[in-house]
Amino acid sequence: MKLFINQCKIEFLRIFRNPYFLFWSLAMPIMFYVLFTKVLNTGAEDKALWDAHFLMSIAVFSVMGSAIMTLGIRLVQEQREGWTKYIRITPLPDMTYFFAKMTGQTAVHLFSIIIIFTTGFLINGISLTASEWILSGVWILAGSLPFLALGVLIGFMKRVDTASGVSNAIYMIMAITGGIWMPMEILPDFIQVIGKSLPAYHYGNGAWSIIRGDMPQLQDILVLSGYLILFMVVSNYIRRKQEAV
Amino acid sequence: MEQAVDIKGLTKSFKGKKAVDDVTFSINRGEIVAILGPNGAGKSTTIHMMLGLLNPTEGEAKLFGANTKETKIRERIGVMLQEVSLMDGLKVKELLQTIRGFYPDPFSLEQLCRLTGLSEEVLNKRTEKLSGGQKRKVGFAMAIAGNPDLLFFDEPTVGMDISSRKVFWDTVKELANDGKTILFSTHYLQEADDVAERIILFNKGKIAADGTPGEIKNQLLKRSVSFVTNAQLPKELFLQYPSVSDVVFKDGRMIVLTDDTDFILSKIFEKKLDAHDIFVDRGRLEEAFEQLTAEQKEAI
């Protein structure tokens, strides 16, 4: 257990010392937030609601990106540099290493959420009830699971360049079609259809429901769980195939 | 006594080509063994199978009588692989502490610094900021961090400068004196000869020879007796003996290639041949080894 906690700490430290992470997962989303709620006039009817809505979008955007890209690309790097191989020879069980990685990553997400929420509170004075803050935070943490699983899938790629290209593309497509950047309603119909079949929209929708005083819809939970199971099954299959060598 | 390494009929095929072909050997505890061979001879593949990183196509490899994949075995081994991999985003100190934490009875950080020659300054650096030589040292420290009974080094001195090599081998010898078993692969002859008590010579996926450096040399090398002569001695004079493989003339000297130089000398004196300035030569290991490597290249 001590080993596990120590390993989580190490993973947490490593992510935080990564300048790419700091830029892509914290600095950029916060800049976007300021841009779309302070600088540009989006013409939203209910400014306070839009500010809160977009804060959720940005938090979802940040965590989703870190789950897919930070995790995926790091896994490929570790594989490539032989680190994964080294760990397999040490007495540290592979599973401990893997779960510590996930836990460390989740701790980082929690930290990102807190920072982004605090920013929203400070610059736009967003007022949500305590339970709304907590619930939306928990939703964003829990809802990141399918994206972590997707990151693991990306992690099976052989080259860092491929992994970074592919994960970037997936990330951007999901963010745009999922209504993370602009509300789903203003997107063309066919994009809405695509967006609603992908997990990002449902991830955001859960948080958007919470700040409107509702609960995430069953459909959101089902779609996210479905993708989680799908990604896990595929990774298990790939892992077995690779281990057979 | 319990054997540190026990390998039976180990074979690995990649796409039908045998990289390692029916290799069998065992290593006693406390031995320093070099796996010597040209690149592509199957050394790394064999080490990977010993470590459980590759599954053998046939045969089995056991360490301390058990499967490497068992935790109790992993606690007793330390490994330095060819590709230096250091977890990024960590200071050397943090990395080594983490690794130490994996093992039940690790070396202290001070001991590790002393053994590997790591300085306080390097300990406080981030791993991604290290030079190649410093990375190698950290890799070495990682391998021995757990105070293991059995150490594997795959081409350990590639990328090390001369002084680092010296520190490395001095430490390896010290560890061996403490009763640790050491197995390293190399394609440097000199290294195998200097450090190892035993050399397992690999060629084309098979064991070509296995013995002390002296025995390996004897097996590999052609010895010769050469001399200057004014008489017209026919080659047949020596070629009639089965121990003689060839007779050549070079630089005004008659050179008799043979397994048994004593015998040739006795014949020279017995027959009172006109021979002076007699040399008994034993080829250099490097030359024999280069020959082996060259043959390998031709085969490909």
Image (tube, rainbow, N blue to C red):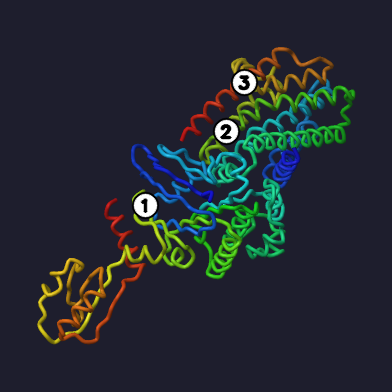
Look at mark 2 in the image and give the residue it sits on: A154
Look at mark 3 in the image and give the residue it sits on: A229
Q: Position of residue B3 (x, y in %)?
A: 51, 49
Q: Position of residue B107 (x, y in %)?
A: 68, 56
Q: Residue most toward the top?
A: A218
Asked whether residue A196 is in view, the answer is yes
The CA span between labels 1 and 2 is: 41 Å
> Residue, x 41% and y 37% (percent of image)?
B57
Look at mark 1 in the image and give the residue it sits on: B207
The CA span between labels 3 and 2 is: 16 Å
**Chain under numbered label 2:** A
Question: Which one is in front in this view, the residue at disc 1 or the one at disc 3?
Answer: 1
In the image, B29: left or right of B40? right
Question: Which one is in front in this view, the residue at disc 1 or the one at disc 2?
Answer: 1
> Residue, x 41% and y 56% (percent of image)?
B200
Q: Position of residue A105 (x, y in %)?
A: 71, 36
The CA span between labels 1 and 3 is: 48 Å
Q: Residues within 10 Å of mark 3 (few under 14, many from 20)?
A: some
- Going by the numbered disc 2, the residue's amino acid type is Ile
Q: Residues within 10 Å of mark 2 (few under 14, many from 20)?
A: many
- Going by the numbered disc 3, the residue's amino acid type is Ile
> Residue, x 69% and y 19% (percent of image)?
A202
**Chain under numbered label 1:** B
Q: In terms of secondary structure, where does tag 1 sit?
A: strand
